[in-house]
Image: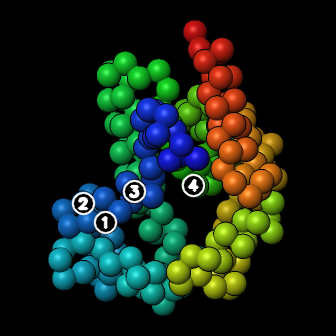
Amino acid sequence: ATAWFRKSGFKVHDSDAAVHELYSPGGAAVGPVASAFPEALSEDGGINRTALSQAVIAAGRETSLATLEKIVHPLVAANRAEFVRVQGEAGEWLVVVDVPLLFETCPDEASLREQVDQVLVVTASAEIQRQRVMRRPGMTEAKLDAILARQVPDAIKRRRADMLVDTGLSDGFSETRAQLAGCVERLISSYP
């Protein structure tokens, strides 16, 4: 979906890309993450994500993830807010923010609306989601189950969304593109 928004000329903030930038040599997360997980510091001065993942598991997954999230989530949120601010000053009327953990970091409606005006959830059936995720390098059933256990269930995401795009409706992207275009049309019609 974010690729479609970019191709359509909209500015997109990608939270995963922001994390990569924050973990790069000189990135704002390097110092605090390396302090909490010294074994994750790479030779080039950045954070080695594989070593970080291993350190989190070795130190006790739940406590370590909480520590890591306290470091990284505020940095990503600040990065996103700055992106939105700059785009707004440049006259952009619609800015897309791709936030995989939006509902996890905004557990209630007030905190959600502090971050975004509208929520578009891109979804598919649980079976299709599982098939897609299992194709990722290094993914295992156990790892996926651990990830899903920490996430807000898809049914709740769907209920909290202002708009839904179901990518499991067809084998191609034409239906998804049509749904995304419909979302933009809806936003245009509601834009003051």
Residue 39 locus on image (x, y percent): 31, 86
Q: How far is the residue under mark 1 from the one under mark 4?
A: 17 Å
Mark in front: 3 vs 1: 3
Within 10 Å of disc 2 (Cα), the crowding (few <14, some 14-19, many 20+) is: some
The residue at 37%/18% (across/down) is: 91
Q: How far is the residue under mark 3 from the one under mark 1?
A: 10 Å
- Answer with left or right where residue 61 lies relative to residue 89: right
**Labelled pair 4, 2 in contact (Cβ < 8 Å):** no
Q: Label 1 sits on what residue type?
A: Tyr
Q: Label 4 sits on what residue type?
A: Pro
Q: How far is the residue under mark 4 from the one under mark 3?
A: 11 Å
Q: In the displayed structure, would residue 69 be above or below residue 156?
A: below
Q: Is residue 30 visible?
A: yes
Q: Label 3 sits on what residue type?
A: Ala
Q: Which residue is label 3 attached to?
A: 17
Q: Nearer the viewer, residue 116 or 69?
A: 116
Within 10 Å of disc 4 (Cα), the crowding (few <14, some 14-19, many 20+) is: few
Q: Label for residue 100? A: 4
**Labelled pair 2, 1 in contact (Cβ < 8 Å):** yes
Q: Which residue is label 1 attached to?
A: 23
The residue at 73%/71% (across/down) is: 130
Disc 2 is placed on an element classified as loop
Q: Which residue is label 2 attached to?
A: 27
Q: Quadrant of the C terminus?
A: top right
